[in-house]
Image: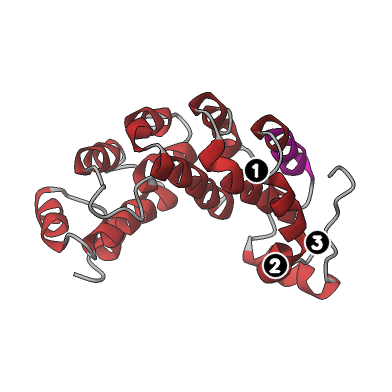
């Protein structure tokens, strides 16, 4: 595993870096090729202990190029259902490391996969992110239930949004609108009532009402 290296395309490096505002170095491995190259390693992870896979996650997330952070998160997603609650919690600091919307939203999927297998832990996981001093962590408290429908806890969603209702941070306001927009596809009346009773930013309100 330590010898694993992506084979990138130099022609992709500049445009991929520009898309991320040149905050991270890239090898030039686009998503389809990354998944193809990492498939054997992901397959191998299913037969390894969670402790070992988490060691792989740490190694890859610490590497310089952005594609390795994506690989680390892919590995975490792959093993998420098998993690203990304590092991899952050990992943939360990564959200704040090398943070941008791409990695933070990918980490959200790790916690989503875990909660689908362990719904009884939703409140505990939510509290890890709710009220966190780092807005990237709070973004996950808002989007944690992003793909849920019948199982979405509106009380938790309301708490997360109200805590950051007036936060002057683009990625927080975008997350509020995104979460409401997604739930609005399933429960439009609830979202309409929420919008009528909460004074949201123009960005959040616009995003929330996109499909109403």
> Residue under circle 3?
27
SS of the residue under disc 2: helix
Identify the residue shown where x is 10% and y is 60%: 189
118 or 34: which is nearer to us? 118
- In the image as oriented, which residue stretches furthest toward the right? 3
Residues under numbered marks 1 and 2 in contact, where contact means CB atoms less than 8 Å apart: no
Quadrant in which residue 2 is drawn: top right
SS of the residue under disc 1: loop
Q: Principal SS element in the magenta part? A: helix
Identify the residue shown where x is 22% and y is 52%: 150
Q: Quadrant of the N terminus?
A: top right
- Mark nearest the camera among 3 and 2 is 3
> Residue under circle 2?
16
Instruction: Judge the density around disc 3: few (<14), some (14-19), many (≥20) Cα neighbours within 10 Å.
Output: many
The stretch in magenta equals 54-63
- The span from disc 1 to disc 3 (Cα, nearest Å) is 16 Å
- In the image as oriented, which residue stretches furthest toward the top? 86
Image coordinates for residue 44, horizontal then vertical, percent: 74, 49
> Residue under circle 1?
98
4 or 44: which is nearer to us? 44
SS of the residue under disc 3: loop
Image coordinates for residue 34, horizontal then vertical, percent: 72, 63
Instruction: Classify residue 68 as left or right of residue 140.
Output: right
Instruction: Classify residue 82 as left or right of residue 31.
Output: left
Q: Magenta span has 174?
A: no
What color scheme is it?
secondary structure
Above or below for 36 versus 117: below
Q: Is residue 139 visible?
A: no
Among the two numbered marks 3 and 2 on one chain, the one whose residue lies closer to the N terminus: 2
């Amino acid at each position: 595993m330590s010898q694993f290296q992506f084979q990138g395309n130099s022609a992709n490096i500049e445009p991929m870096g520009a898309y991320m505002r040149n905050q991270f170095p890239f090898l030039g491995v686009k998503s389809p090729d990354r998944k193809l190259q990492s498939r054997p390693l992901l397959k191998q992870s299913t037969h390894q202990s969670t402790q070992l896979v988490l060691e792989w996650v740490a190694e890859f997330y610490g590497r310089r190029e952005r594609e390795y952070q994506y690989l680390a998160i892919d590995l975490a997603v792959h093993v998420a259902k098998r993690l203990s609650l304590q092991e899952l919690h050990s992943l939360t600091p990564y959200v704040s490391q090398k943070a941008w919307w791409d990695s933070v939203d990918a980490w959200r999927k790790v916690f989503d996969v875990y909660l689908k297998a362990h719904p009884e832990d939703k409140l505990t996981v939510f509290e890890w992110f709710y009220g966190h001093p780092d807005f990237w962590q709070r973004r996950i408290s808002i989007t944690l239930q992003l793909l849920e429908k019948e199982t979405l806890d509106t009380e938790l969603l309301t708490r997360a949004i109200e805590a950051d209702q007036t936060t002057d941070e683009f990625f927080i306001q975008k997350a509020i609108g995104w979460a409401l927009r997604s739930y609005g596809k399933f429960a439009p009346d609830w979202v309409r009532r929420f919008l009528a009773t909460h004074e949201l930013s123009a960005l959040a309100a616009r995003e929330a009402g996109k499909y109403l």
